[in-house]
Image (spheres, rainbow, N blue to C red):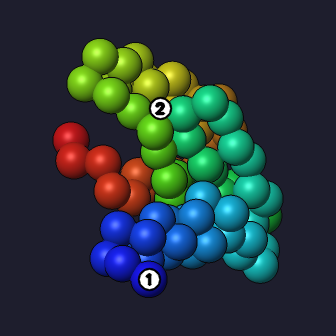
Amino acid sequence: MGKDALISKFHKELRQYAEVEGYIREETEHVVRHISQFGEKSFIISSNVTDGNVEKVIEQELTYFRKLHQAFRMEGIQL
């Protein structure tokens, strides 16, 4: 298996389709979120954004988490 295939497999199995105990997994068009059930920080583990929509997606996620009153982190997105 080549390098690109391994990276793709890693992304799918350990990010895009991961299930984490104590978190509810939510998938949207642009992100995969894990929402804490026990007051821990929630997180976005995977994203599919472009230069054209990154600011809009980030604003949508900030709004979403504010409504939940939860702290969160975005993995893999440089702000």
Say whether residue 8 is left or right of residue 21.
left
Residue tagged by mark 1?
1
Q: Give the percent coordinates (x, y) of residue 59.
A: 42, 23
Q: Image height check: is 78 above or below 59? A: below
Q: Image height check: is 59 above or below 17? A: above
Q: Give the percent coordinates (x, y) of residue 49.
A: 39, 33
In space, the residues marked 1 and 2 are separated at their CA atoms by: 38 Å
Please rate how many residues cluster around mark 1, counting C-alpha atoms within 10 Å: few if below 14, some from 14 to 19, many from 20.
few
Between 2 and 32, the one nearer to me in the picture: 2
At label 2, which amino acid type do we have?
A: Leu
Which image quadrant is residue 64 in?
top right
Residue drawn 39% across the image and 58% down it: 75
Residue tagged by mark 2?
62
Q: Residue furthest bottom?
A: 1
Whether residue 36 is visible to the viewer of this picture, yes or no, is no
Q: Quadrant of the N terminus?
A: bottom left
Q: Quadrant of the C terminus?
A: top left
Q: Give the percent coordinates (x, y) of residue 17.
A: 68, 63
At label 1, which amino acid type do we have?
A: Met
Q: Give the percent coordinates (x, y) of residue 57.
A: 44, 25
The secondary element bearing badge 2 is classed as helix
The secondary element bearing badge 1 is classed as loop
Which image quadrant is residue 24 in?
bottom right
